[in-house]
Amino acid sequence: MNEIRPRDRDAVLQALRAGVVPRVGQHLVQVGRAAELDALLKDIERIADGGAAFRLIVGEYGAGKTFFLNLVRSIALEKRLVVMNADLTPDRRLHATGGQARSLFNELARSTATRTRTDGGALPVVVEKFVTNAKSEAKATGRPTEEVIQDKLSALSELVGGYDFAIVVDIYWKSFEEKNTDGMASAVRWLRGEFGTKTEARAALGVREIVDDANMYDQLKLLARFVRLAGYAGLLVCLDEMVNLFKLSNTQSRNSNYEQILRILNDTLQYAPEGLGFVLGGTPEFLTDSRRGLYSYAALASRLSENAFARDGRVDLTGPVVRLGSLTPEEFLILLQKLRNLFAFGDSAKYLLRDEGLMAFMEHCHRRIGEAYFRTPRTTITSFINLLAVLDQNPGADWRALIGNVKVEPDKVPTTLDNAVTTEAGDELASFKL
Amino acid sequence: MARQRKTSLGLLSGLVVLVLVAYGIHLVLAYWQVTLTFFVIAGALWLGHKSQVPKAKPQSGQTPQSPPSTAPRKAVGVSVRLTSSLDQLRTDLKQDPRPFWVDANRNVTIRGRAVGGMLYVGEDLAALSGYSVEPALINPNLSAVTQVQDLSERRMGYWPSYNGISPEARGAYLQWLSAGRKDPNADIGLVFLYFYGLERRVLADTLSVPVPAAEIAAISAEVQRLLGIYSNSSFRHYANNFLGVLEAKNLPGGLYRSSPPSGPGFFLRHKVGLAQCAQDGVPLPADWAIAWLEGDTNSGSLPTPARRCPSEFRRLFVIRYAQAYGEGLILPKNKTRLRFDYHAASASFHGWKHSLGIEFDLPDVTVLSSPLKKLRVIAEECCVELSGYSRRLAKPGIDRDSLECIADLPYSLWPDKYRGPVEKIRAMVATSGQPLAVPFESVLKWIPPHTTLGKSLWRSFVARLGEAGIGIEPDPASGGQVPKGETRVAFFPSTPRERTDEISARYRAAAMTLQLAVAVASADGETHEIDRTALIGRLEEWLPLTAIEKARLNAHLRRIMADRPKITGFKSQIEAMNKSAREVVGKFVVSVAQTDGSITKAEHKMLERIFKLLNLDTAALSAITPEEPRTVVVAGKTDSDHPIRSPAPAFVLDANRISQLQAETERVAALLTGIFSEEERESPTPSVQLENPEHEGDAPGLWGLDAMHSGLAAKLLERAHWTRTELEELAEDRQIMLDGALETINEACLDATGQSLLDGNDPVEVNRELVREDQAV
């Protein structure tokens, strides 16, 4: 059994305890979904080979879409991809005319992560890595750095908007040579798409284009090519909460967004932008609603329709849609086992609860809130971790007494729950000692 | 004959030079030592033939209207261009700037245009580096078009030089000069060309020849004038640094005692002010803190509110800053000395032997990131507070003085005319300790002007008063309506912390019960008899309330007692209650009616109405006839919020499915483990070879890195922590990009050992485990 790193363990437990999806170490608590992961892993490998990928992750509320996306993100980082991720909101869309698409790009750029910078904000790092690599190469081959950089950048110029992109990268390293921090800051601002007007960008950098609503996807393609030039394997873009597009009330703007998705889908399946992948997360209604969902757009409906034979447990993961079912009680039990294992640093001698304890916990939850405990397991998991924490810190406490006191509520604001469990358990123990 | 020979020779050497110049113009500047060799060889070649070439007449006067040589040169157009390129090779260029400088009092005419003074004019002044013609030198012999249409067109490249640019560009430059040097649309290259001359005059000529102090002052004023017209960021950067270096020598102490220089940008004066502040151990004044924040380019610009409503942002920042740090943040005295490196804009300075840097005996606090982070936290909090107001301002045609705006503005920023009445009310409720009920009309007199007072507007206004420590009843958050004309509102002391949107269902139930109870008690017109404290006290027996809820309930009671209480508007609330809860409310109302020992007819009638409203059987009331007083026992508490769930179906698990899932999960775990620790499995072969760092040259690089990165990694391993500043210094010593280098090292380390060497951003932590592991091996 490979050892569990304390840092990963704490990160996972803290996140779950707060009711959010962990950013690292998801592999420690992943349950099942082997086929789905396999499919995504192949996608990532294809991207790293210079191919392209497009996946739509569909699942009900609480089915673990975000968890799955984060896991994919972590895998991609380990495979040396650069990953950008963002949640769609009413103010952040794929297509817009009022700056909402640029805003999505801002968020994506801000979240740029690499294997060594998993927390985001790695866009300047990517640029510096590019220059650093070019310098090393220049040193090794005895050519001037300028020439090496221009050589590499010329590969970008053939893409839409590539010329200005190359100029900005060029300005970044020239500013560095001159120690002009203003210039470096302006260049990074441009790359992050933070220039609001062309005039502003022209005054600061002398370029005539900026990242705006219309060319945001082209910019992503450029970035994909650029990260490969900088020595990374490719670029993966994760977009969550796609249901926000479904919620758009204006038919026209909804359709333009779907058109953008169609463009991305067609691109990735046909022309294959080099080293670029998209993973989108959304609820089933976003996909299948025939009036407002993706299926309302005929061209997408035919491309995304699922294999008619793949139902009732049979799966087909060659299509772009990956369906995540909600957890079953059995899966939930395994999840609890994994958590117990994680809590004990993978050492089965230190397990705080035996399987019968887990069953008792589940039965208790089942009585309190019914099926919700495994369908939307957020709050149940939080209580379980709290229970383990109490057992851990109070050796000798009897789990039977504690489980009866565990309060579980249907998935709501989880913070009140923390206090409820710990104080009640604490009281119990105080009287026990007396 | 001589002319022809000259032309062919010129062509020959000119071609060599042109190729060199075109191919390596920036290399000349970056690696001038190398390319100098080429120049010297080419120069020597040219000098060998020079004796045969008639020497160009040195330009000594300042206003040659039309030199004799111009006309024939113009006739052979090509040769003019070539000879001008040849100028760059001439080693007999003049070093003494005096004959070339045209001061501000003179007005020189070039190619028919009076272009004024403060310029270098002539034919052969050397650049400071000595190997080319001074870029700012206006050579009247060179052709220039007479009229240019559009000055904003970019006609020159990076680091232009008057004798290297096209005749159109020269024409544009002369036109710009003669038109007062103020066309705001002019290409920034023209301004730079002019600026090059000023830069040289002040920073270089002063070292070799006497320059009157008045002239330096005039040039400084001129640059300031240009700054007022041209906002190009590059120009602003150079010009402000130029002004900085001018004033650096005689900056007074204690700059921080007065306000920092206003306007965008962060310059030497700011840095010196902050440094003096740290040196003197004085708390950092708020306006300097703001200047620092706004000048910081590394952490990105401040959120929108700071830019959209700067004055409100500043005022709020001052308040929050004082709350967080009292008089101000004490800056640490760090060891990095404040240095001012002047990078000249003009190419004339490239390769010049003098250094323009200035070192101060002050700590350079601007390299520290922790104080800035603290300030940024405050600034971002301020922006969050101001975000509503800022969004409001973004709408067109909004009046800053309207209630819509004011209600979005944090209370501490309200204009005095609106704060005044609020403060008065606060003083009143604080001294009396009792809620204050006034007709809403009197409130309307002092609240800011508005068109319609909707629910959301009233809600945000109430929230603002909450910040001032005043609560209001009715509050939409607690289910109250927006007050109108004659209704009364009650003010009561509240804590600013109270979040009005967290008012509980319990409170709403209590407020309703109370209103019904008062309706009964005042049915016979004797409201004064009710003891408010007792009423609330009894209510609390079955509904535990927090202190703030009690204060609010008291104010609510005060208000409904002043008005004639209504029993309408509770329908939806009552419908949501279950029967037992409704019964409890009914019983309470009855008990209130009985406090004075008897139930009058009017009271009985009101009770009947209330029971109907509560959807209770009025038959229960017949038991308590008006004549027959009877005690009603109040028991239990309302449980309307939590309907008890029906028991869930039986609990069973499928054992087969579990084992199947377990197997699948194991498979996934194996798959993932492969991804997340593939290197660890390879680690038995010792891949970490931390050699003695001194031998980095001959040993293969650490983790397969090249010599430079390997050296840096070895240096990093010496300590467990590095601050960002220290790392930046290390990077600067090595002339490399910090983030790029760290990324490269980290990646290599991950590849080799499966762990990352560096963690965190500031301070950066070094994973020293890797060293120990290696030493053990």
Image: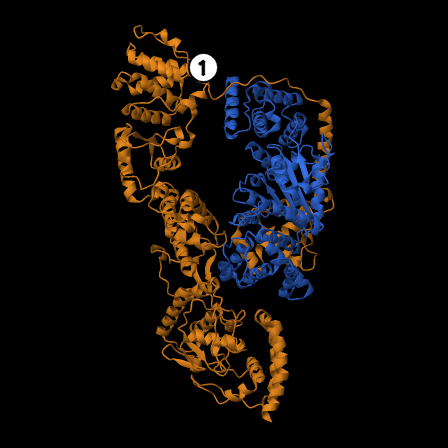
Q: Please give the letter of the chain rendered in blue.
A: A
- Where is A142 relative to A405, above or below? below
Looking at the image, which residue is at 42% across and 26% down? B504
Q: Nearer the viewer, residue A204 or A133?
A: A204
Residue B40's x, y, as percent? 60, 80
> Which of the image's four quarters has the N terminus of chain A?
top right
Q: Amino acid at mark 1?
A: Ser
Q: Colour of chain B?
A: orange
Q: Give the quarter of the image for residue B11.
A: bottom right
Q: Quadrant of residue B613?
A: top left
Percent coordinates x, y for residue B771 in the rendering: 64, 47
Instruction: Please provide percent x and percent y for residue B704.
Output: 69, 54
- B397 or A218: nearer the viewer: B397
Asked whether residue B74 appears in the rendered view, the answer is yes
Residue behind mark 1: B580
Of helix, strand and loop, which one carries label 1? helix
Where is residue B299? Give x, y as percent. 50, 51
How dense is the environment of label 1, judged by Cα within 10 Å: few (below 14), some, or many (20 and up)? some
The answer to whether residue A394 is above or below residue B319 is above
